Image: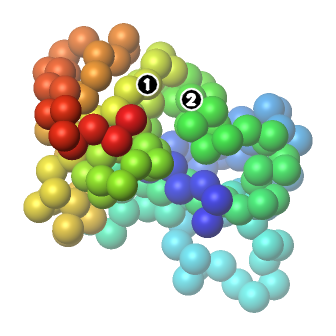
Amino acid sequence: MRYQIRFERELPADALRRFFQREYSIAPDTVHVGRAADRTVDDARPVAMLTPPDTDEGFGWILTGDTDLADATGQAERDLAVAIARAFGVRALVDDGGIHPDRWLLVSADGSSGRVLTDADAAADGDLRIVHALEPIDGEPQLAVVPPPEWARDW
């Protein structure tokens, strides 16, 4: 998948479809909200899929998409996460591109972003919980900032 954006809470299905149609001219019937198993064989191939969490997982709502979504939006994963976060007032996590699996890029509801550390034990169960920020994030003043030690930095 080219896009895998994790949201802290549900994005209303109809509102998400309208957003994609208004902003990127993506047909509403190509934005699937639900599990892949809920789709029928006759359904149009989705451009984007928003999958709910299995349980009450942190950042468990996952938006996925591939080349079709990239072509339609013309945006990188982080930029699309910023656009959706601002439009829906929700926080999102995207892969920070680093080598550490417990480090993510947090996108705040205001669109500001920065790297965060997640709880590795909870993440093993699919639950992404933010431990602290690794750098200051304008829209997240409540998050403690604990920079990684010099030897552990990959930025």
Which residue lies most toward the front here? 151
Quarter of image, res 87 = top right
Amino acid carrying label 1: it is Ser
> How far is disc 1 from disc 2 in space, using C-alphas?
8 Å
Residue at 24% x, 12% y: name it: 141
Quarter of the rendering occupied by the C terminus? top left
Q: Which residue is mark 2?
A: 82
Picture coordinates of residue 80 (x, y %)? 64, 37
* Front-lying residue, 9 or 92: 92
Picture coordinates of residue 24 (x, y %)? 83, 38
Amino acid carrying label 2: it is Val
For the residues carrying marks 1 and 2, which lies nearer the camera in this image?
1
Q: Look at the numbered discs 1 and 2 and tell me whether their residues touch, using CB distance below 8 Å.
A: yes
Tell me, yes or no, if residue 35 can be seen here.
yes
Q: Which residue is mark 1?
A: 113
Mark toward the start of the polypeptide (1 vs 2): 2
Badge 2 element: helix
Q: Is residue 40 left or right of residue 148?
A: right
120 vs 103: above or below: below
Q: Is residue 25 left or right of residue 112?
A: right
70 vs 82: above or below: below
Badge 1 element: strand
Residue at 36% x, 62% y: name it: 53
Quarter of image, res 33 = bottom right
Quarter of the rendering occupied by the N terminus? bottom right
* Front-lying residue, 127 or 131: 131
Picture coordinates of residue 60 (x, y %)? 36, 55
Quarter of image, res 78 = top right
Residue at 54% x, 66% y: name it: 34
* Front-lying residue, 136 or 53: 136
